[in-house]
């Protein structure tokens, strides 16, 4: 039995992105929080973000895509085209930090789909300025699978980033411990490094068979009704 249960990458991204969009919709209703800034990295995490943006648009939100370094894989390009076909806005990349700074002023919620479980320091440009700018924005953050800048096993770690003004002016070096989201959506199962996460925590990935769950000792909770996500208890109540 494969770790992915014979699901294709396209299928896994679709399920992950749908779970992310449903989490945003459950926590942040579209009447009060319509403008979702979807920040995508160049890997599969960014692909999840693109799928989520498409679903959020169908849910009635007004997603905006921020992709300073778009992924080069064919699947990523197809997902970009799908979003473009739905007239989902894409921030210009001529000066991504200034674009991000400007967009944050009119953003209600940020979906962090930048770095995933394979992240290893250092944080390279332009993300060494992107992460601090998002962190200091004061906007609600929903992170996909693991907060960007965290280690999948150790959790929060210190990484080198840049000082960034609210206007998007990049300065000298600074130490940074990753994003501190309000909401986390773990995919398939919670990663070891998120044990210290204290915000609202959801699980998505309702495709895991009982055989897979037993083989990998996932000990997953039951999903309610027809939901694709389930909220997990906070650490204090475990």
Image (tube, rainbow, N blue to C red):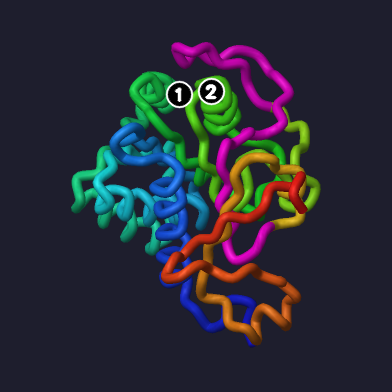
Q: Quadrant of residue 47?
A: bottom left
Magenta residues (range): 161-190
Residue 192 in picture, x, y percent from top left: 76, 55
Residue 9 in picture, x, y percent from top left: 47, 70
Say if 201 sits above or below 163 in the image.
below
Residue drawn at (73%, 82%), measured in percent from left and top?
A: 215
Q: Mark 2 points at which residue?
A: 133
Q: Are marks 1 and 2 in contact (CB under 8 Å)?
A: yes
Query: Along the horizontal axis of the image, is 74 left or right of 58?
Result: right
> Callout 1 environment at 10 Å: few (<14), some (14 to 19), or many (20+)?
many
CA separation in Å, label 1 and label 2: 8 Å
Choose between 173 and 23: the one closer to the eye. Answer: 23
Choose between 3 and 220: the one closer to the eye. Answer: 220
Nearer mark to the viewer, of 1 and 2: 2
Q: Name the residue under label 1.
A: 97
Residue closest to the far right: 154
């Amino acid at each position: 039995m494969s770790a992915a249960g014979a699901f294709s990458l396209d299928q896994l991204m679709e399920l992950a992105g749908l779970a992310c969009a449903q989490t945003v919709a459950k926590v942040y209703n579209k009447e009060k929080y319509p403008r979702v800034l979807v920040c995508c990295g160049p890997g599969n995490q960014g692909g999840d973000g693109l799928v989520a943006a498409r679903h959020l648009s169908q849910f009635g939100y007004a997603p905006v895509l921020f992709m300073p370094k778009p992924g080069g894989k064919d699947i990523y390009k197809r997902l970009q085209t799908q979003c473009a076909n739905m007239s989902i806005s894409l921030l210009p990349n001529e000066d991504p930090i200034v674009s991000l700074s400007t967009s944050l002023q009119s953003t209600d919620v940020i979906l962090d789909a930048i770095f995933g479980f394979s992240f290893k320091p250092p944080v390279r440009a332009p993300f060494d300025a992107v992460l601090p700018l998002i962190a200091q924005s004061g906007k609600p953050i929903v992170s996909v699978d693991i907060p960007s800048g965290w280690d999948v096993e150790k959790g929060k770690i210190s990484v080198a980033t840049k000082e960034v003004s609210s206007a998007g002016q990049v300065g000298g070096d600074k130490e940074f411990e990753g994003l501190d989201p309000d909401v986390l959506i773990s995919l398939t199962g919670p990663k070891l490094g998120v044990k210290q996460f204290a915000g609202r925590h959801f699980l998505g990935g309702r495709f895991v068979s009982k055989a897979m769950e037993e083989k990998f000792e996932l000990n997953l909770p039951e999903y309610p009704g027809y939901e694709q996500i389930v909220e997990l208890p906070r650490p204090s109540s475990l």
